Image: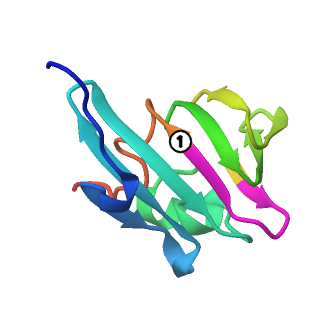
Amino acid sequence: MTGIMRRSFDSADETRPFEEGKGRLDLLTTEHGPVGRAVFEPGWQWSKHVKPIAGTDSCQASHVGYVVSGRMRIVMDDGQSGEVGPGDFFTVTPGHDALVLGDEPCVALDWVGFGEYARAQGT
């Protein structure tokens, strides 16, 4: 690679919609691995809007990301919970649920866990 590489999530390599129109994942494939921007609409919850796609009891992705806007609560399988919001860097280990807080979409970037996120098993 030389120089500068610029990509736009508005021209993503792949877009994966969530159930019931509650958002989407825009994915860029880079030489460093996949990078995603997810838009989680108000009312979105992983266990309602991604679980049917993933086919697992809880989210099994690791996340390393940044919240651009909106707020989200993350609840680990063991009951631990926390909130993330605009400007927050976050890491989350596998085994969690999550839901949007408030009436604003939560927009997050993730450069670790979105490669397989919201992808139907076997595809």
Is 104 one of the magenta-colored residues? yes
Element class at badge 1: strand
Q: Position of residue 63 (x, y in %)?
A: 54, 32
| Above or below: residue 10 compared with residue 115 | below
Q: Which kind of residue does numbered mark 1 sit on?
A: Leu
Query: Would you identify the image quadrant in which residue 100 lies?
Result: bottom right
**Quadrant assignment for the C terminus:** bottom left
User: Taking 39 as reference, is 73 left or right?
Assistant: right
| Above or below: residue 32 compared with residue 17 | above
Query: Would you identify the image quadrant in which residue 39 lies?
Result: bottom right
Residue 98: tell me if it is visible: yes
* 89, 80: nearer the viewer: 89
* 2, 96: nearer the viewer: 2
Q: Hey, which residue is sitting farthest front in the picture?
A: 3
Residue 58: tell me if it is visible: no
Question: What's the magenta region?
Answer: 99-108
| Above or below: residue 69 compared with residue 6 | below
Which residue is pictured at 57% across the width and 67% down the height? Answer: 49
| Above or below: residue 31 compared with residue 2 | below
Which residue is pictured at 53% across the width and 41% down the height? Answer: 109
**Quadrant assignment for the N terminus:** top left
Mark 1, residue position:
109
Label 1 Cα neighbours within 10 Å, binned few <14 / some 14-19 / many ≥20: many
* 85, 1: nearer the viewer: 1
For the stretch drawn in magenta, the main secondary structure is strand
Q: Where is residue 35 in the image (x, y as percent from the top left)?
A: 38, 38
User: Taking 9 as reference, is 74 left or right?
Assistant: right
Query: Would you identify the image quadrant in which residue 95 lies?
Result: top right
Is 40 one of the magenta-colored residues? no
Q: Where is residue 77 in the image (x, y as percent from the top left)?
A: 71, 38
Which residue is pictured at 83% across the width and 36% down the height? Answer: 82
How was the colour assigned to the protein in this rendering? rainbow
